[in-house]
Amino acid sequence: TLGNCDYQCWRDAASAGGTTICPGTCDITANTTLGPKKYVGNLKLSSNAVVTMNGPIHVTGDFETVNSAKLNLNNSFGSNGTVLIVDGKIRVSNSGALNPTNANPPGYILAVTTSTATDAINISNSAEAALFYALEGGAQISNSGEIIAIVAKSLTINNNSELIYHSGLADATFSSGPGASWLMIKG
């Protein structure tokens, strides 16, 4: 499980599924499944790809989902979620999305960045997204970007964007797989 987990614990859980070296950027343009997995370099989802997330993902570079690509949490998680941990920046734009499960209440993707940049998280251009955590960096939401929840050092909201609180979110749980739990510890 990911109980009492910190950044390194999430990285280790992702690495347990193996490592992929991305020379520059791994660009996923077709429907597939990911996780648990570590990506050394940048990871990009694009070209309408529908990607099912089966466990924690660690990206050592930047992560982005663009051009209507979707990262969908596998419905087998039920009301639990899992973690996408990124050492660089996170960008969701151009109708990209990080989608929860269909359960009631849903399980969510917790997208965490350890970046200290003022734009560590950038959600824009009709993008829909998940839960975001940038304790040391800033977040920007613009051009009809929509998120469910965020923790960031700073937050800028522009141009018809929304931060929407979903009921039951305070009780959200996250795991490496269905049935596990977690506790947020800065590390």
Image (spheres, rainbow, N blue to C red):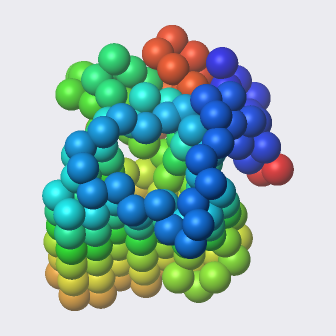
Name of the residue lying farthest toward the front: 23
Name of the residue lying farthest toward the right: 187
Measured as percent of width and height from the top left, residue 150 is found at: 47, 60
Which of 87/162 is in front? Answer: 87
Q: Is residue 113 left or right of residue 53?
A: right
The image shows residue 17, relative to residue 164, as above or below, that is: above
Number of numbered discs visible in the structure rendering: 0
Residue at the (55%, 32%) spot, across then down: 36
The image shows residue 150, relative to residue 165, as above or below, that is: below
The N terminus lies in quadrant: top right
- Is residue 129 visible to the viewer in this orientation of the structure? no
The image shows residue 167, relative to residue 186, as above or below, that is: above
Residue at the (43%, 38%) spot, across then down: 34
Measured as percent of width and height from the top left, residue 99 is found at: 28, 44
The image shows residue 33, relative to residue 179, as above or below, that is: below
Which of 136/99 is in front? Answer: 99
Measured as percent of width and height from the top left, residue 61 is found at: 62, 67
- Is residue 160 visible to the viewer in this orientation of the structure? yes
Which of 167/76 is in front? Answer: 76
Residue at the (75%, 29%) spot, across then down: 4
Quarter of the view holding residue 15: top right
Residue at the (57%, 16%) spot, across then down: 180
Measured as percent of width and height from the top left, residue 33 is found at: 36, 35
